[in-house]
Amino acid sequence: MAEEGVCLLYSADMLLKYREKLIAKKVQPERRVSFLRSLAARGILVSLALADIVPRVLADPDDDVFLACALAGAPLTWSLTIPTCCRWKKHTSDR
């Protein structure tokens, strides 16, 4: 979840991408499983629809899912990262 103001977001598509990369890099199966389980246990699952993953990163289209997760997950992190004193508070200046 949120540690020191950082929220770890992930989607099912991202887990698949990480799995593919770990296999391609010949990471040992037990280390792959450990990493993916750790990510799932510590992160916030973001559900992505196919329409959420739009082409944005021309140089590497595989990165589109990561950007889509960040954009779709932003509202989930608002309440975790913004201090309670700042949420929905109107700031007025003394004049």
Image: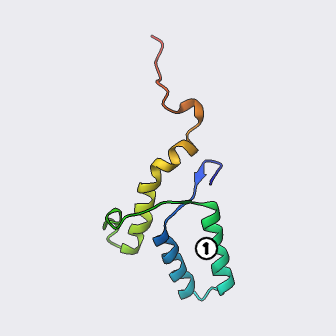
How many numbered marks, from 0 up?
1
Packing grade of label 1 (10 A; few <14, some 14-19, many >=20) is some
Please tell me whether residue 52 is drawn above or below residue 20 in the rendered image. above
Residue at the image point whose x is 38% and y is 68% from the top:
64
Residue type indicated by callout 1: Leu
- As rendered, which of 91 and 30 lies closer to the eye? 30
Q: Examine the rendering and report whether any part of residue 65 can be seen.
A: yes
Write down the residue under mark 1: 36
Q: Position of residue 41 (x, y in %)?
A: 64, 64
The picture quadrant where one finds residue 36 is: bottom right
Quadrant where the C terminus is found in the figure: top left
Residue at the image point whose x is 60% and y is 66% from the top:
40
Please tell me whether residue 71 is drawn above or below residue 24 in the rendered image. above
Residue at the image point whose x is 57% and y is 82% from the top:
22
Residue at the image point whose x is 52% and y is 33% from the top:
87
Quadrant where the N terminus is found in the figure: bottom right
- As rendered, which of 59 and 66 lies closer to the eye? 66
Colouring rule applied to residues = rainbow
Q: Position of residue 17 (x, y in %)?
A: 48, 76
The picture quadrant where one finds residue 83 is: top right
Q: Position of residue 12 (x, y in %)?
A: 49, 70
Q: Secondary structure at mark 1?
A: helix
- As rendered, which of 68 and 60 lies closer to the eye? 68
Please tell me whether residue 39 is drawn above or below residue 82 in the rendered image. below
Q: Examine the rendering and report whether any part of residue 60 can be seen.
A: no
